[in-house]
Amino acid sequence: MTDSNGWETYSKLVLQQLETLSSGIEALRTELQDVKGQLTELKAKEDRVQDIKTWKEKIDDVASPAQLKTALEEIDDLKTFKTRAITIFMIVQALTGFVLTYAHIL
C-alpha cells in the first residue's frame, strides 16, 4: 500500500511539474513570437534607413546641403521678384489704359 501511495504522490508531483514546464514553454513561445515581430520591424526600418542613406549620397553627388540651401533662397528671391514684376506690369498697363482713355476723350 505504501508503494502505491508513494507512486501516486510522485506521479502527481511529476504531472504538476510537467504542467508548469508546459506553461513556461508556452510563455517562451509567445515571447519569442513577439521578439520575431520586433526583429522584422527593425529589419524593415533598417532597409528604409539604407534607402535614405543611398538617396542622400546621390543627392550629395549633385549638390551639397549648403548649395541646396543657397538654391532654395535664390528660388524664394525669384518668386518675390516675379510677384513684384507682375504687380508693377499690371499697374503700368492700367495707367497706360487710363492715359489712352483720357487722351481719346480729349
Image: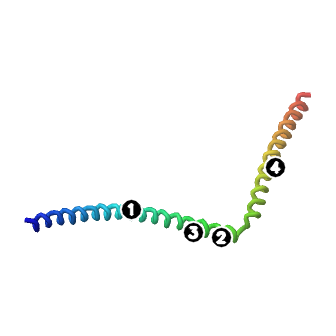
Within 10 Å of disc 4 (Cα), the crowding (few <14, some 14-19, many 20+) is few
Depth check, front residue: 95 or 43: 43
Quadrant for the C terminus in the image = top right
Circle on res. 57: 2
Q: Where residue 8 appears, x then y in whole percent?
A: 14, 64
Indicate the secondary structure of the residue bearing disc 2.
Answer: helix
The answer for how far apart the CA atoms under marks 3 and 1 are is 28 Å
Q: Are marks 1 and 2 in contact (CB under 8 Å)?
A: no
Mark 3 or mark 4, which is nearer the start of the sequence? 3
- Residue beneath label 1, please? 31
Left or right position of 15 against 39: left
Which residue is disc 4 drawn over? 81
The quadrant holding residue 57 is: bottom right
Point out the tag, 2 or 3, that comes first from the N-terminus.
Answer: 3
Of circles 1 and 2, which is in front? 1
Rendered image: mark on residue 50: 3
Q: Do residues under tags 2 and 3 come within 8 Å of each other at their CB atoms? A: no
Q: Residue at x 52, y 63 (%)?
A: 45
Give the CA separation, mark 1 to mark 2.
39 Å
| Mark in front: 1 vs 4 | 1
